[in-house]
Amino acid sequence: MKSRILVAEDDQVQREIIADILLKADYSVRAVESGTKAFEALRAESFDLLLTDLRMSEMDGLDLLRQAKRLRADMEVVVMTAFATVETAVKAMKEGACDYLAKPFDKDELLVVVNKAVEQGELRRENRRLRDLVFEASSLGNIIGECAEMQKVFDVVRRAIPVNSTVLIQGESGTGKELVARHIHFSGPRKNKPFIVVNCAAIPDTLVESDLFGHEKGAFTGAETSRQGKFEIANGGTIFLDEIGDMRLDSQAKLLRVLQDGIVERVGGSQPRKVDVRVIAATNRDLRKVVEAGEFREDLYFRLEVLPIPIPPLRIRMQDLPLLVNHFREKLSARLRRPAPRIGSDVIEAFRRYRWPGNVRELENTLEQLFILSDADTITVTHLPEKLRAPTPAPSEFKLPSGGIIMEDLEQDLMRQALERSGGRIKEAAELLGLTYKTFQYRLKKHEIDRKDWA
Ligand SMILES: Nc1ncnc2c1ncn2[C@@H]1O[C@H](COP(=O)(O)OP(=O)(O)O)[C@@H](O)[C@H]1O
Ligand SMILES: [Mg+2]
């Protein structure tokens, strides 16, 4: 498609010559004789480039430039000016013009400047488009993450949204399990139906069943009226069973029945009720191990794990740190109704070294604390709480798991984590593992790891 140029020039002769040259150079041209007319044209249609004289009656070129930039930030502007007023041209460039033409100019000069401006505009729009794409890829709704692990999470989440299959989200506390569950519910076909949260660890054992499945009047001491359970309340929607790993074994049996037949029975009742509820379960425990320990029914585990979503802890995806920090800066700034302070790069470095046992939630809370307690425009390391200023902890909370471990796998895994944290920089990754650059590189080759995956 031809690039569209708007020419604003009050001198009729010059206007016609310019338009003629540009038309012959295969541009689509609209030529007007005043700033006001140009502004009208801009309001009505879009142009790739505005070529405007600086001195015109009514609205002069500089005013037009300002208004045009406000109206069409994406459009390039070139100003034309008499040689004597080059200073004004400089001023125009400060206001956002990308180039200027000193009068008198010839055909070649005109075309060089115009071609360059049009190309530059195309490049800029293309860059912006790419940036938007990148941003889109690094978040899913409110869930932020650009690392490979989070991309996998997003992929499963997207697939989980339109279907009814049970989802099992596993991850440490604060990794965003509930956030993911909400996203699945509120982006899917059940979004106008209830989303009911049940914290299986917080309900006393004796009440789990009546809480989930309801009870009839007189079912137990204190049951003065009959009551709907959470499953009945969630009918048509989604139930989020948080900390499912802490559910008692006999409650698990009842839950399994609901999952298999979609039937609930109130405590003390005899009438089975059909419910249509999507189940999303979450746990911060390794449910596989809880099964092995005999504390969780294997059949229920398999029934829940139709769509497993493992969310990695923050410390192995430090690559996401800058994005997360920015996200929370904006969120907090909106909530506290004041501009967010800048975050020094030394702070990000300190964040990278910290283990974040409370994961993203801890990061969010830390930032909130920093915002509220400090009046500085820029937050630096000195503002950080003690835990974040402490030197790197000794590298061994590592415990050999009961089933043992394959050394080679561990090595690979640690190397990947180090690359993740260093954003693909070999030198830093090697330092994190106490290896020399050469050794690290040698082992990269050995494991066929491509550091570019993190760059
Ligand atoms: N990937 C993420 N992107 C943005 N915010 C996140 C992310 N993970 C967690 N959070 C935020 O951290 C907090 C805790 O998340 P939550 O879903 O409650 O964690 P969990 O259920 O795993 O303990 C929430 O305020 C949530 O907004
Ligand atoms: Mg939670």
Image (cartoon, rainbow, N blue to C red):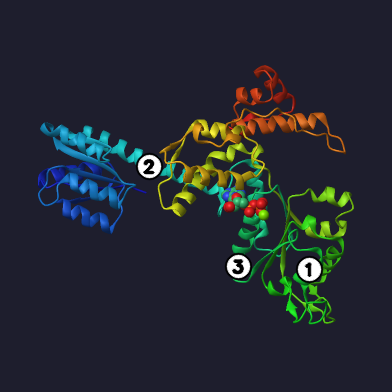
The amino acid beneath tag 1 is: Leu
Name the mark on residue 122: 2
Mark 1 residue element: helix
Residue for point 79% across, 74% down: 264
31 and 328: which one is in front? 328
Q: Is residue 8 left or right of residue 118?
A: left
428 and 37: which one is in front? 428
**Quarter holding the C terminus?**
top right
Check whether the beta carbons of the residues at disc 3 and disc 1 lie within 8 A of each other: no
Q: Is residue 421 left or right of residue 132?
A: right
Mark 2 residue element: helix
Q: Earlier in the sequence, mark 3 or mark 1?
A: 3
Q: Earlier in the sequence, mark 1 or mark 2?
A: 2
Residue 154: x and y in percent read: 63, 51
Front: mark 1 or 2: 1
Q: CA distance from mark 2 to mark 3?
A: 40 Å
How packed is label 1: few (under 14 Cα within 10 Å), some, or many (20 or more)?
Answer: few
The amino acid beneath tag 3 is: Lys
Task: Indicate the quadrant where residue 217 lies.
Answer: bottom right
Front: mark 3 or 1: 1
How packed is label 2: few (under 14 Cα within 10 Å), some, or many (20 or more)?
Answer: some
**What residue would you read off at disc 3?**
191
Residue for point 10% across, 47% down: 12
Check whether the beta carbons of the residues at disc 2 and disc 3 lie within 8 A of each other: no
Name the mark on residue 207: 1
Residue for point 66% across, 30% down: 418
Task: Indicate the quadrant where residue 148 lies.
Answer: top right
Q: CA distance from mark 1 to mark 2?
A: 64 Å
The amino acid beneath tag 2 is: Glu
389 and 326: which one is in front? 389
Eyeballing the image, is 191 above or below 444? below
